[in-house]
Image (cartoon, coloured by chain):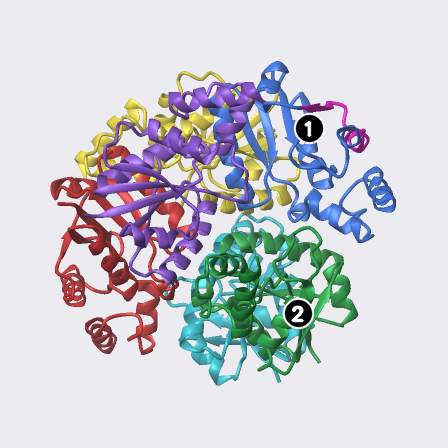
Chain colours: A blue, B yellow, C cyan, D green, E purple, F red
Amino acid sequence: MKIALYPGTFDPITYGHIDVIERATQLFDHLYVVIAINSKKTPLFSTEERIELAEKSLLHLNNVSVVSHNGLLVDYAKNIKASAIVRGVRAVTDFEYELQIAQMNRKIEPSISTIFLMPHEKYSYLNSSIVRELARYHQNVDEFVSLVVSEALRNKNKKV
Amino acid sequence: MKIALYPGTFDPITYGHIDVIERATQLFDHLYVVIAINSKKTPLFSTEERIELAEKSLLHLNNVSVVSHNGLLVDYAKNIKASAIVRGVRAVTDFEYELQIAQMNRKIEPSISTIFLMPHEKYSYLNSSIVRELARYHQNVDEFVSLVVSEALRNKNKKV
Amino acid sequence: MKIALYPGTFDPITYGHIDVIERATQLFDHLYVVIAINSKKTPLFSTEERIELAEKSLLHLNNVSVVSHNGLLVDYAKNIKASAIVRGVRAVTDFEYELQIAQMNRKIEPSISTIFLMPHEKYSYLNSSIVRELARYHQNVDEFVSLVVSEALRNKNKKV
Amino acid sequence: MKIALYPGTFDPITYGHIDVIERATQLFDHLYVVIAINSKKTPLFSTEERIELAEKSLLHLNNVSVVSHNGLLVDYAKNIKASAIVRGVRAVTDFEYELQIAQMNRKIEPSISTIFLMPHEKYSYLNSSIVRELARYHQNVDEFVSLVVSEALRNKNKKV
Amino acid sequence: MKIALYPGTFDPITYGHIDVIERATQLFDHLYVVIAINSKKTPLFSTEERIELAEKSLLHLNNVSVVSHNGLLVDYAKNIKASAIVRGVRAVTDFEYELQIAQMNRKIEPSISTIFLMPHEKYSYLNSSIVRELARYHQNVDEFVSLVVSEALRNKNKKV
Amino acid sequence: MKIALYPGTFDPITYGHIDVIERATQLFDHLYVVIAINSKKTPLFSTEERIELAEKSLLHLNNVSVVSHNGLLVDYAKNIKASAIVRGVRAVTDFEYELQIAQMNRKIEPSISTIFLMPHEKYSYLNSSIVRELARYHQNVDEFVSLVVSEALRNKNKKV
């Protein structure tokens, strides 16, 4: 059984992420979506919220699990016997940073490969930060995120 | 069974290619190395020679086939029921071109994903053209290509 | 009256070009599409064919003229009293080369500005060379070029 | 009448900005310089100071207005009936980020085009942050900013 | 006597830095390693610690001095009569930023050249921030930093 | 004595090259300008002409020699006991290719360092190919090349 993991902040999950996840679930037997518990940046959504939004946005896929992780990604990958780390790359400047991380991960654990997948070109400009910004100005974001996420964004921007 | 293909000119196959192939054979059940019969550029080695050098350099792997192909890659991929096209990317300028090709291939055949793999950092500067150049000046290339390839390069440069 | 020109090889004109042209015709009073008579590369379509295909693909726009030119672009721009040279940019590596050309043109004729426009993201991977390649393998290209162009491509590939 | 806007932080306005503004005022009938009231970053100069410095540095141009704005840029552009958003691009890494923003803005409001202009090559290294840094160390910045700005910078660095 | 300086944060010094330093000491008669007293970012190691770790990691080189500096680098370079500022560049995105800084430094003081050196490809992914991250998760970093630095990192992560 | 070499095609030498050469002659005791006898591309000027134009454009510098070379650059560098290969880099896409060549040269001969120098920003768009193009259309190129070169270009374009 080939296992892969797809790490990220997912604050919140977008259709760009989901496109990469759908591709990855066709290439691997099981995919773990690994949500980083990042202590430096303060996310808009809590870890629990980000897990719930991802799970609800991925109900149509049956070989995906959503988990959270704090620590070195490669350690987690070894524990779940993953053979690959999946990364979505849209742009050249993304890619250079990703190559550096991938080289370092390969050094730490040579048995795990990083593979880069490209989201559909209609999501090539999309990222979570732009979606949060649009939602903050009460812009409709239904083209970019699933319904549960757009509702959660509306609620966040009401409360604040 | 997950099948992938790895297209290229392989004029000749280098340790950079082999590193990508070894990674890909761990991720997929079978890998086709597809040597392009490129009518525009005149390669140093004929199609038959490039196939033979690739086969002899990949004897240690048992889930790889070396084939040649003339035509649209995506058609070939569909015929052999491949779910992925594998590309090695070392550098940012490579990557942008690769993204364009991958977008177009995705448009033509959405069911096939392009995945990008990174060769070991010690091959990050390596390509077939640099190897041919070194061999032309009788430089030792054993660090960059397998023994059968370095011998074939020596023979080519004797004859010319 | 603000006049601009949009230079290129247009071998053949694609929907990516047309998207840039439509944008430019909204920003300027008149746009000249300037087809380069490039003596170095041998185009698939002759200058006359490229003009005809561009004209027929742009019939829906009434402030565009299609012309051909051999020589220094900036000289032509001065003759037609253009205030801007329009360039479409899809990618980072394109852009760097374009910046160099634009700097040089600015040096030669400071009164003319180069402006960069971005085609729709659905054409971000598209260029004439990919379209010619697809047509060569009898792939349907109706998504990428106008009907007159796709017919012309089919005829070229019959004859050859 | 063709209207454009040129958004930015302008903390403070430099000769690089002014070069782009001068070019844009030749291409459009009226240009709005839109100063972002950015709540995240703390600018060196207040919104009012940044407006005043921009206005005093642009007295030689009679089709420019300096305004400030808090919110979604595209909404503002629609309100003032702008047909274009102007961005200066000096470098490749700038450009990739700008393309993403432009794609998103095009998605939100397809009728407005983003156009990229290139500042004079003698300002290709210049940005407001480098100017603030130089002024902090009491370096002469008269080559990079107008006299009102260099005086304002001297005053800031006295007070602190 | 040709003098150069090599500025940076060195939080902490890595084998990537040391590789650049070794190269620079062969090209120049004396090299100053200039540790920036950066008031904005809070480094993991204090200025004194960073100097000590650099000095102890460079004991094998006899034409290097480690100093710290707060202020404009070019002023310091003039004081010590340096003819060159040395920068290590591993990647394209690094490089663009470095070019901008170098252009500005050349403007301020035309007599001083910035020269870019490339670390060994085996350090092409390495930077201080990745090393700090690895050490935080108690990963062995002996391949990336000298023994005094790896010990200092272990001590930091015990205390916290 | 520190010796460096500066390789290139120099078809013809421009003020961008000369700027890099002037910088390099301040950093090294002697600089060899090494003109490649490139058998693949057909240069506008013969090897002898390129040597003569370079020599006449560099008369003001007394620690430079102009030579030509056919073969592996690193072999030549070892013969003349050079400690450095100098390369001018203006742009990001240049740079990535240069890094690959430099890595390969370092592999072949670790004792020789490649150093990258940046030409003055006013030459950031300049290259020999643009100069040849301008001269072909009888454009004045005195801003870009020395008088001997601009005269040689005028003569070439008369004869053709």
Closest to the observer: B50 or B14? B14
F93 vs A50, left or right, is: left
* Quadrant holding the N terminus of chain C: bottom right
Q: Residue at x 24, y 26 (%)?
A: B151
Q: Which class describes the residues within 10 Å of circle 2: few (<14), some (14-19), or many (20+)?
A: many
Q: Which class describes the residues within 10 Å of circle 1: few (<14), some (14-19), or many (20+)?
A: some
Q: Residue furthest front?
A: D159
Number of the front mark, 2 or 1: 2
Write down the chain letter for disc 1.
A
Residue F45 placement (x, y as % from top left): 21, 64
Q: Which residue is mark 2?
A: D51
Residue B34 placement (x, y as % from top left): 47, 32
Write down the chain letter for disc 2.
D
Residue type for callout 1 = Ile
Answer yes or no: is residue C138 visible: yes
* Marking on residue D86: none
Q: Quadrant of residue D62?
A: bottom right
Q: Residue at x 60, y 73 (%)?
A: C55
Residue type for callout 2 = Ile
Q: Quadrant of residue F141?
A: bottom left
Q: Residue at x 31, y 42 (%)?
A: E32
Residue B113 placement (x, y as % from top left): 61, 35
Q: Which residue is mark 1?
A: A37
Q: Are marks 2 and 1 in contact (CB under 8 Å)?
A: no
F55 vs C93, left or right, is: left
Q: Quadrant of residue C25?
A: bottom right
In magenta, the rendered stretch is A52-69
- In what element is the residue under mark 1? loop
Answer yes or no: is residue B101 visible: no
Q: Residue at x 57, y 82 (%)?
A: D60
- In what element is the residue under mark 2? helix
